[in-house]
Structures are given as C-alpha cells and as structure tokens.
Image (cartoon, helix red, strand yellow):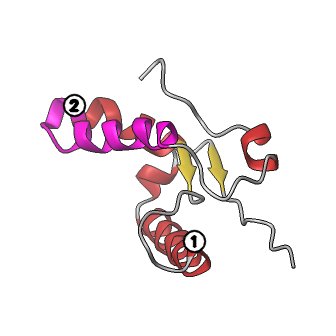
Amino acid sequence: LDGSRLISREDVLANKPHLDDDFNYRTDVLRSLTQTCRALRASCLPRYFEHVEACIVRGPRVWYRQLSERLEATSLMLAQCPHLALHVQYVLTSYPCCRQ
C-alpha cells in the first residue's frame, strides 16, 4: 500500500475525464483485507476510512448519478456508524467540468 497513489489536488485540478486505475488500487486492497479475517479487519478498517473518495466512477452509468448516490450512501453510512466516522480524515469529491 505504500506505493499506492492517493488523489491529490493536482489530480483533481487536471480535470481528466477519468482517473487512472492506480487510484483504485489502495481502496480495492484495503476493502479486500477488511473482509479476510477479524485481525486484518481491525487493522485495515481505519486506513480504509481514512480517505473517503467519492470521485471514482465505475461502470457505464451516468457519472453524476453515481457520484450523488455514492456521496449519499457514504454520508448515511458514516452517520449511522460514528465509530467509522472517527477515522475519516479526508473526503474528496470532484465533478468534471462540463464544457460546451
């Protein structure tokens, strides 16, 4: 995980239509580790919730629906689970610039 990239301000300001797959690596690995066993869950869950990134869109659905649904679901989950909300240090969301 040390080599994984977090989304920086520069990445957001670059306004690319899609983020690179290496941004998903950290989240995917930590999610998998939290589902492996109790010891890994206790160790990895705080790191998983340290950076809440609601700007990664996956799949063919419309991006703004995915982002709004993800923000809503994440917010509700953190409101219902204050023990997880304690670990959140950053919430990153980004909407692509729509140019006509």
**In the drawing, does residue 17 fall left or right of residue 72?**
right
Q: Which residues are magenta?
A: 21-40
User: Going 62% across and 78% down the picture, which residue do you hit?
Assistant: 64
Q: Which picture quadrant has residue 72?
A: bottom right
**What label sits on residue 57 in the rendered view?**
none
Please tell me whether residue 14 is drawn above or below residue 41 in the rendered image: below
Give percent across and percent down for residue 39.
18, 30
Residue 4 in percent (x, y) is at 49, 26
Q: Cα distance, mark 2 to mark 1?
A: 29 Å
How many circles with numbers are drawn on the protein? 2
Tell me the amino acid under the disc marked 2.
Leu
Pick the front one: 84 or 100: 100
Q: Amino acid at mark 1?
A: Leu
Q: Nearer the viewer, residue 18 or 69?
A: 18
Is 85 in front, or is 61?
61
Residue highlighted by disc 1: 67
Image quadrant occupied by the C terminus: bottom right
